[in-house]
Image (cartoon, coloured by chain):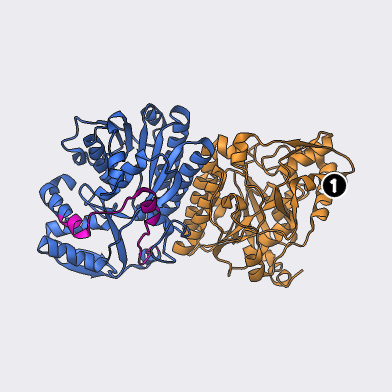
Chain colours: A blue, B orange
């Protein structure tokens, strides 16, 4: 591990942390880590059934943190919860690309209206808080070149990407105009324990793992597309760095991985590690093809050069760990 | 005038046109022109007092078009009005940069929620309509180079720019995914008769003209900033071209002018044409400085090369015409 480890992972005992979407995949991994580091953690989660929130994600930590059940669209409860926090990890969001197309309004409510309201509240009740926003590579759309860096044009292929980008711009604007200390990370495919596996709403790897465990074939759509994956541990490290490093202001930073893999190879690797399973290759339906982005992987050099962060978990390790986790805890994710 | 005149300005007698924001500045000028060309025009306008709608803008045309008073946020009335129209000019919007900062939610409702709802309705009840969206140079923010062309990065300095960009992306997405025939124009400063002069909500030139006529000094903030201006007649021509030319799909096109002028010089020119008046130079307050963009002018070569359009009214002509209009009709704009 690099130097950042020493300075930024200490002194969490004085931090009062709010994590929106804290019962979700990345949020819960982050919450557990910050509790381990000694920070005081409050979680906000709405537990909307189609989203990533799952109380089992906080298993063993229930008494070490506060869980507040509310929706980030609920302006008044949010205004109260935002007060007196030193760091706000703003991870709550609607993440399903397909849901954003069938129900664009809900995506708008959660990924725009609530985000704007959260920033307005911060400006009023807690202007000195550090705010970290989790954005997504989805805003780039179909890459014009690879790896995709932060100056790549913004060309989202779905409603979710449009709204996540608007929300990024809110965070940047509130930093520029009102001096809020905000910073945005653009996450690529994050995987690991505590992700949603009930369906493909959070990541297709979730439903692959579920199918593997229940003995159904893995459905691979296309299969030739290259993708990059980050272990959620590495993403949590990046969030921790961002939370503490006030020099990182507003400018979005890509996360990413030096390992890339074709989806079909990933499916085969998963089966190899699990010891059994089969693949069913699927043709893209026409409508879905229109929102497919082909090959994608991110350049994370900018974040690396400014912070020293780089992903240290390799894909094989992550897949093994994740398969183990779901083999042991399968029933808590159905 | 170029060739486009012949082909695209004919045959409006078969067009059923809907203009959102049709009682506003650009909308009313467009409505009058299309009526003159023989088109059947329906106007939707909410007449929100802070916006550009003014029934006097349709003076003399009241019996030649239909005016429907409703708000584009009103999904059900919109769904009815969108039916059976061949061309929809989607011009309604909140335009004030400062209002978008003090009341971001209303800007969000009108420039995002209502736009998304309009496209969803079109997709359901009128998927073959041609839809022209009026966007703004505000989405570029502070220019990195001049003149600003369409590949310039998107970096809005206010909430209004963020939402107008999201709305552009909606129009593009609904074209890509659902084959709606949409096209976006990015307008620069449009001026001419029928603009709002009550205050600076639509354009600072409005309040300048008002002050000139009532004998108050013109307040010039800064003064050194270069700007480009389009006569509303030229903008109407561009909209007409876009409405008819189905080959122009989705990709945003800048409008612009080959003439640029410093704000202070513009104020002096206005006084010279009017024959009297004085200037009060103002220092930018700190908050406003943060959302100022410095020099700005657009490159309109892309639109010119694909359509033959170029601005043909010079600034002197436009200012004279505009001053005459408001000298004659001043009381209808207070």
Query: Residue A158 versus residue A188: which sits nearer the camera?
Result: A188
- Residue topped by disc 1: B324
Residue B160 among those drawn in magenta: no
The answer to whether residue A49 of the structure is visible from this angle is no
Q: Is residue B89 above or below residue A223?
A: above
- Quadrant in which the N terminus of chain B appears: bottom right
Please tell me how many numbered marks the rendered image carries: 1
On what subunit does the disc labeled 1 rest?
Answer: B
In the rendered view of the protein, which quadrant contains the C terminus of chain B? top right
Q: Residue at x 61, y 42 (%)?
A: B97
Front residue of this view, candidates B208 and B107 = B208
From where the camera sits, is residue B166 visible?
yes
- Residue A289 in percent (x, y) is at 37, 66
Q: Residue furthest right?
A: B275
Q: For the residue carrying disc 1, how many other residues have a C-alpha within 10 Å: few (<14), some (14-19), or many (20+)?
A: some
In the rendered view, does A145 fall on the left or right side of B180? left
Image x and y of residue A105, in percent: 42, 47
Stretch of the chain drawn in magenta? A291-320
Q: Does the magenta portion include A300? A: yes
Depicted B4 relative to depicted A327: above or below:
below
**Disc 1, SS:** helix
| Quarter of image, res A320 | bottom left
A218 horizontally vs B244: left or right: left
Percent coordinates x, y for residue B36 in the rendering: 75, 59
In the rendering, at what x and y percent does residue B205 appear?
74, 44
Task: Give left or right: position of A152 versus A272.
Answer: right
Q: Between A330 and B279, which is closer to the camera in this rendering? A: B279
């Amino acid at each position: 591990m690099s130097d950042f480890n020493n300075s930024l992972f200490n002194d969490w005992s004085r931090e009062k942390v709010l994590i929106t979407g804290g019962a979700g995949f990345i949020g819960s991994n982050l919450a557990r880590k910050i509790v381990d580091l000694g920070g005081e953690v409050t979680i906000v989660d709405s537990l909307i059934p189609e989203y990533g929130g799952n109380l089992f994600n906080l298993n063993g930590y229930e008494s070490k943190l506060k869980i507040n059940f509310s929706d980030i669209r609920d302006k008044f409860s949010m205004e109260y919860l935002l007060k007196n926090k030193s760091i706000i990890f703003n991870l709550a969001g609607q993440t399903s690309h397909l849901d954003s197309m069938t129900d664009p309004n809900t995506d708008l409510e959660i990924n725009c209206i609530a985000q704007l309201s959260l920033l307005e509240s911060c400006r009023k009740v807690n202007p000195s808080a550090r705010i970290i926003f989790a954005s997504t590579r989805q805003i780039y759309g179909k890459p014009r070149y690879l790896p995709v860096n932060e100056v790549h044009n913004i060309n989202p292929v779905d409603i979710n990407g449009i709204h996540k980008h608007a929300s990024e711009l809110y965070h940047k604007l509130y930093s520029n105009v009102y001096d809020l200390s905000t910073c945005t990370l653009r996450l690529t495919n994050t995987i690991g324990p505590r992700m949603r596996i009930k369906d493909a709403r959070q990541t297709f790897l979730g439903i692959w793992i579920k199918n593997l465990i229940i003995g159904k074939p893995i459905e691979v759509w296309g299969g030739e597309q290259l993708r990059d994956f980050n272990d959620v541990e590495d993403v949590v490290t990046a969030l921790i760095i961002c939370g503490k490093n006030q020099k990182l202001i507003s400018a979005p930073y890509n996360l990413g991985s030096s390992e890339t893999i074709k989806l079909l190879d990933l499916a085969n690797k998963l089966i190899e590690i699990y010891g059994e399973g089969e693949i069913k290759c699927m043709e893209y339906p026409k409508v879905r093809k229109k929102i497919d982005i082909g090959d994608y992987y991110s350049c994370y050099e900018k974040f690396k050069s400014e912070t020293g962060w780089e992903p240290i978990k390799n894909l094989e390790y992550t897949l093994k760990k994740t398969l183990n986790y779901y083999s042991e805890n399968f029933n808590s994710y159905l």
